Amino acid sequence: MSKNNKVHHVYDGIEEEDNRLPNWWVAILLGSIFFSFGYWFVYETTKTLPSPLKAYQTEKEANAAVQAKLAAGAPLNDDTLWAMVKDEATLGEGKKVFAQICVSCHLDKAQGSIGPNLTDEYWLHGSKPMDIINAVTGGFPDKGMEAWGARLGPERVKQVAVFVLSIRDSKVPGKAPEGVDYQGNPAPK
Amino acid sequence: MQTQRIEYDDTTVRRFIWASIIFGVVGMLVGILVACQLVWPTLNFGIPYTVFSRLRPLHTNAVIFAFVGNMLFAGIYYSIQRLFKARLASDFLSNLHFWGWQAIIASAAITLPLGITQSKEYAELEWPIDLAVVLIWVVFAINFFWTMAKRNEKQIYVAVWFYIATIVTIAVLYITNNLALPLTLGKSYPIYAGVQDALVQWWYGHNAVAFFLTTPILGIMYYYLPKAAERPVYSYRLSVVHFWALIFIYIWAGPHHLLYTSLPDWAQSLGMLFSVMLWAPSWGGMLNGLLTLRGAWHKLREDPVLKFLVAGVTFYGMSTFEGPLLSIKTVNGLAHYTDWIIGHVHSGALGWNGLMAAGMFYWLVPRLYGTKLHSVKGADLHFWLATIGIVLYMVSMWISGVTQGLMLRALNPDGSLLHPDFLETLAAIQLPYLVRALGGAMYFTGLILMCWNLIVTALAGKAVKTTVEVVVVPKPPTPPGEGLVGIILGKPFVFSGLILILVMAIGFMTSAMVAMVLMGAIFLLSLLAWVVNTRDKKAGRKSWFAIIEGNGFAFTAMTLVAILIGGVAELLPTILIHQSLPTDGAKYQKPYTVLELQGRDVYVREGCYLCHSQQVRPFLAETMRYGEHSQIEEFVYDHPFQWGSKRTGPDLQREGGKQPSLWHYNHMIDPRATSKGSNMPAYPWLASNKIDTKLGEKKLRTMQKLGVPYSNAQIDFAEKDQQTQAETVLKDIGADGLAWDSELVALIAYLQKVGRSQGIAFDAPSARAVGMSEGGR
């Protein structure tokens, strides 16, 4: 057994040599230690590079700027929205969003279940095109309408609002009417 | 020379082997079932006890503590008797250890499907079982150290160093993480809350991986690999460097599970950096294993044992490279909460633990039954099934994790989310989910093949009694300078202590100049240590390491010191910070009402945290999808924290007030009614189960003891308050036939409260950005 002269110790027949550490391994060990000192120095001691929270703030501001610029280019109002109802492309996209997101509460034909029927002539939060935009964007959390603005983004909010405009008054049988009609008369009980 | 005849206790070893195999089969079978449930959510057959969120902890606990646990006890008990040249100290303790551990496993297998859980990952078992675990672990420790004290071999081999680290550290981790105040026999609240609880849990969780699934298996590698290869271990000095570096560094790495969360930034950075520094120490173990095969690689062709051991070590190398990579903040930002992490843990569990176990069993069983392995071809087939199975598992999880991670953060050119609906991302990973189940099934088939092979082998032979003649080593007097004082004044100890103090000092520095001076000092001190060490070696002085390796007590004490430093350095400040958090500032969390607390306990019991996080990270895509990012003050009353570690479904931190209560009701009764394509199981029993209304008062009282500011009036009126609120919620839901005291009402009350801390408005941002000022509210 002991022909091997590099043997350092023997345990239960297991010989143990004492070869030197591979250079590349030592390089990884020391390299990661040096890296750690450097990282700490830059991010924690001097805070030269931004922390995750700071980086997030920057990202958020840049995104808000992009959105503001886009909004300034194409102002939304009741008239422009009504005009879009004739645009097949916008309607098609809006229908897709509706089928993906809104059906869970308003059902597939917008006849209402958890949320109100969107095909009757009664409205809970205003019937104007911009009212619909605002309802989708900010929601009515107390009444169960989720705020979709952040998740969908302005483009899709616009598309789905246009789709909702296109199906109003189509009177699909479903949930009983809620809210008021265009003249302000309350829904029949 | 005095000799002594001893008979090794191999009966205990045999028992642990069979227990490990049986529970391996059970644990992995449950694994395949839960993998399939993610594709076909109705596979729980409508039964609460088989629902994904209750079976998943059963799967992890069975594989970790029953399969690997029994395997490592077998491996340790066999090898220490040979390495110490001594029989296990006490047959009584060995028996108690074996049967006690199996009783713990049985009670886990009963309580987890019943929903009795602490909801801390890999620490789900409730307090009575925790006490049993601690007791049996102490039995194990006594049996081990007593055998060590009786040893007939002066020096302690590297395998045993790793065993010592395992025993000492698991004891510290397990006790610290499970400190809780019991409410009933099957329910307790942890003494920690929020960010504190999160840090303690992941300090434990990460080091359970380190000291239950890694160090004991490394020790086993150091014994069984050279035995099977019949080659010398490559390098003693590599053993020394990688052992001490590994156990010292590992304990700091826990916060890498909490990157970008509400954990203070400095702790996150420590978690990341120590994980990066862990790369080389981990690979040291792999190198010592693989280089032991120098000149014996041809043996791999014929010997299935070596095939398994070498592949196991290779998978260890792979996952310990992947680990540091995943700990880098930006990589983690993509991978965390996705299946990439699931793939990572399985390359460790199936690749490293599973293959090492198989190699060890194929080597041990023929020897313990005095025969040859029944079928080498069968073992070869097992090897290929297992390896291909792991590869399918890992690759499908990489694809699934990266796909979902990228989809969730993808933005449109206008800055909005490309995939606003979480379910779109789930639809995209259906194929990887199927492939994962297939890979798992292949691995399982290999395991069954091993069962058959080992049973036939054992039946062909007979349980062997091994008796050996050992030379009794008399206890020599301690040479001068090798006593306790000599050890504490030893150069490596003094030098590393000094360096450590300077390193810690850097942590508190905000001045670049001072930090640089300190770094210079550390560099010079390290250089000096190296020079002194080289000179001592040349002079032929006995090294400090050789001294403590001959002194079991000193070695154990040094190990304890090494693992305590990182733990104390991270936990203590966090606990202090937590205690000084404002509870009445702008962002304070209101204590849960008694009904919300009841609902929260249902949330915990059902294991919702296993698929839903409650932690919104500061990423644009995330705050747009879920709402304002989470902040440290929001969790001060969360005993236990429910941040989760995986998003099979969306985050729920800002769920409160987001959806109508009726939506929640419909969703719980049939998730696919509200969310087409969802893979969430239905929880219809929540509608018929009743909360224990009498317990509400005691819950508040227990929480009050933990520091949650409930007034005595609130406690006195708990039962009435709970009904009042429940009736409001019930009206809000408006569903027929639902009782006010049903669990579902309480759960919905909780879900409507989550994340609605004062001063944190749900981010309803775009209204202004789109250019509209007045909403139609």
Image (cartoon, coloured by chain):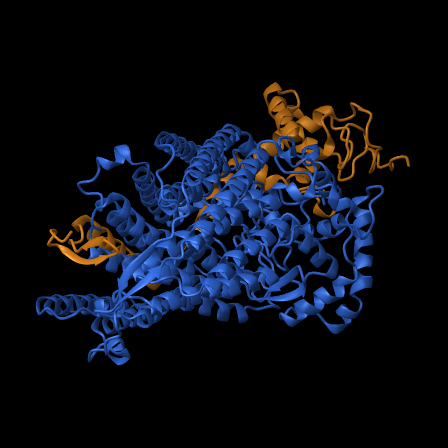
Please state the horizontal and vertical placement of residue B415, each as a whole percent of the image: 50, 38
Q: Residue at x 71, y 36 (%)?
A: B670
Please state the horizontal and vertical placement of residue B393, each as a whole percent of the image: 44, 34
Please state the horizontal and vertical placement of residue B516, each as a whole percent of the image: 24, 66
**Nearer the observer, B542 or B94:** B94
**Nearer the observer, B602 or B352:** B352
Q: Residue furthest right?
A: A189
Image quarter of residue B240:
bottom left
- Residue B298 vertical placement versus B510 (above, below): above
The number of discs equals 0
Which chain is blue in the rendering?
B
- Residue B412 vertical placement versus B81 (above, below): above
Q: Tell me if residue B692 can be seen.
A: yes
**Nearer the observer, B361 or B446:** B361
Residue A168 appears left or right of B459: right
Image quarter of residue B699:
bottom right
Residue B85 appears left or right of B330: left
- Residue B572 vertical placement versus B240 (above, below): below
Q: Tell me if residue A48 can be seen.
A: no
Q: Quadrant of the C terminus of chain A?
A: top right
Please state the horizontal and vertical placement of residue B92, each as a whole percent of the image: 49, 64
Q: Colour of chain A?
A: orange
